[in-house]
Image: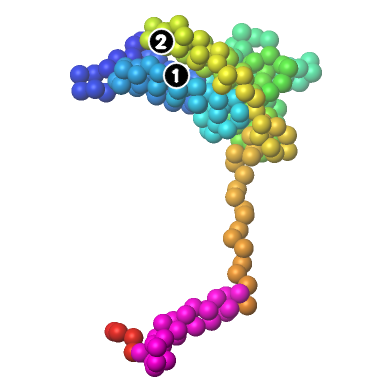
Amino acid sequence: RYPAKTSDGRLLAKGVETDRRDVPGLMRRITTEALQAVLVESDADKAVRVTAALVRDLLRGKACVSDLIMTGGLLRYTGKDIKNEANAAAAAGGVGGGSDDSTGPAARMANKIVKRDSGRAFAAGERLPFVFLAGQANQQDRTEDPMFAVVQDLPIDYQLIWSNKIMPPLKKLLEPALTKKQFEELFTGAHTKVKCTIASKAPGRMGSYFALNTKMAPEKSPEKTREKEMLVAEKEAAELVCYKCQSVRRRKG
């Protein structure tokens, strides 16, 4: 696992968050831009500025939801296991199972999907996309299918994504490259204390990012259109009349 600068000035990263599937897309973007600034451009201040701006947008709820999706594998957890676990959880009135294989965000989300759609089948090792929702439940039980969350307009937990999924690995990655002052500014600065202020059905709702822009351009009134055409015609006519002798001049061409 290492990030490096190649001989021709490109960023090369292996095994870090720039190419991992179990982190949000936003984390990959932050890591790539920060490492580009530090390693390729030798500009640690720029790395702090770029990262702070992206974190601020995230905590304000302005990050694109597609950048907040993670994926997790089911490992040894098969479709049959999922159905058995979902049935057991439903009988117990809970949301998750108790077996070792059922732990993990992807497995818990698979249980929810099966309870909603008994015909949904999963294969062992299949990777499932998910997002983390706001709430009081533990982290694993707050995973949800991104499309279901959008349709139901469910709130996403931006603070959890920053504090649990982005900040810890980012600290390890950037600590050697930043001064103490830069490090403190990046991880405790004012941008880390902002709150989501999205206005939709409720603050922080995901559906607002996927809503179609149905606002149409206002229709032009026929009367106003005709009036504008007449004004243009009068102006053109005036340009063809000599202001001294009022004689009509021929338009060239």
Residue 32 in the image: x percent, y percent?
A: 39, 23
Left or right: residue 69 versus residue 97 is left
Amino acid at pointer 2 = Leu
User: Which residue shows up at 31% across the image and 17% down it?
Assistant: 42
The image quadrant where one finds the C terminus is: bottom left
Query: Element at badge 1?
Result: helix
Up-down: is 194 above or below 217?
Answer: above
Q: Nearer the viewer, residue 171 or 113?
A: 171
Residue 187 among magenta residues: no
User: Which residue shows up at 70% across the image and 39% down it?
Assistant: 200
> How far separated are the C-alphas under marks 2 and 1?
9 Å
Up-down: is 182 above or below 225?
Answer: above
Residue 31 in the image: x percent, y percent?
A: 42, 20
**Farthest front residue in view:** 244
Residue 147 in the image: x percent, y percent?
A: 61, 35
Q: Earlier in the sequence, mark 2 or mark 1?
A: 1
The image quadrant where one finds the N terminus is: top left
Q: Is residue 81 something one can see in this rendering?
A: no
Q: Nearer the viewer, residue 45 or 195?
A: 45
**Farthest left residue in view:** 7
The residue beneath circle 1 is: 48
Q: Tell me whether the residue at label 2 lies in contact with that at label 1, contact meaning CB atoms closer than 8 angstroms.
A: yes
Which secondary structure class fits the magenta region best?
Answer: helix
The residue beneath circle 2 is: 178
Q: Which residues are magenta?
A: 224-249
Amino acid at pointer 1 = Val
Residue 244 among magenta residues: yes
Q: Quadrant of residue 105?
A: top right
Query: Element at badge 2?
Result: loop
Q: Nearer the viewer, residue 175 or 134?
A: 175
Left or right: residue 88 versus residue 31 is right
